Amino acid sequence: MAIRFILCFNKQGVVRLVRWYQPLQDGKNTAETIAQIYRLISSRDHKHQSNFVQLSDVTKLVYKRYAGLYFVFGVDLNDDEPIYLSHIHLFVEVLDSFFGNVCELDIVFSFYKAYMVMDEMFLGGEIQEISKDVLLEKLSSLDRLE
């Protein structure tokens, strides 16, 4: 199980967070890939279609929309989607607890803190920590160091 990339973008397709853990397989550049992902996800019916869609012959997308932001994981085709969906939810919960009701502006103006949260949870495309309490304790101690 490995995460190929993590993306967060708004409803207009503006990227707010991005982390690539593996190089792209199909020779496209990152901007083309992000535009393709945005078109693919934004055109789906979120009430009647699943949160999983195949991107290429080696990658599928697991995504969830929270308010005006899409959180997207690119994972291997044979990985279990609900596990990643639960980690997206945990990531958003930790962001919400850390920022105190997180919104897009928190991510825009404190992007370094959002990346700090991401790096505490995911390292090198692998899930590092799944306990919300442990994560918040680590993050609060890191935040105090500033």
Image (cartoon, rainbow, N blue to C red):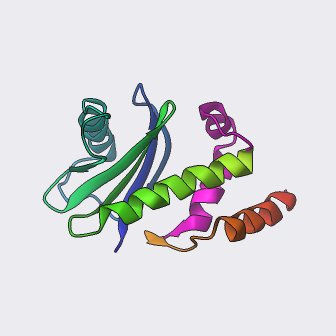
Residue 10 drawn at (x, y percent): 46, 32
47 lies left or right of 15: left
Name the residue at 13% across, 59% down.
57
Left or right: 77 as drawn, with respect to 122: left
Does residue 6 lie above or below 4 as drawn?
A: above
Residues 70 and 29: in front is 70
Total labels drawn: 0
Instruction: Please name the residue shown 85% across and 62% down the image.
Output: 145
Q: Residue at x 25, y 33 (%)?
A: 44
Residue 81 percent across, percent down from the top left: 31, 61
Q: Main secondary structure of the magenta part?
A: helix
Q: Nearer the viewer, residue 75 or 27?
A: 75
Residue furthest toward the top? 12
Magenta span contains residue 117: yes
Find residue 15 and report its horizontal and vertical position in percent.
Answer: 46, 37
Report which quarter residue 94 is drawn in: bottom right
Residue for point 25% across, 29% down = 43
Q: Quadrant of the N terminus?
A: bottom left
Q: With respect to residue 31, does 82 lie above or below?
A: below
Q: Residue 21, can we see it?
A: no
Position in image of residue 58 (x %, y %): 18, 63
User: In this picture, is 66 found above or below 27?
Assistant: above
Quarter containing the C terminus: bottom right
Please check the rendered image and state whether residue 56 is part of the magenta-colored stretch, yes or no.
Answer: no
* Horizontal arrangement in the rendering, residue 37 relative to residue 114 (left or right): left
The extreme front residue here reads 48
Query: Is residue 126 rendered to the left or right of residue 131?
Result: left
Query: Within the image, what quadrant is residue 101 found in?
Result: top right
Look at the image and give the residue range highlighted in magenta: 100-123
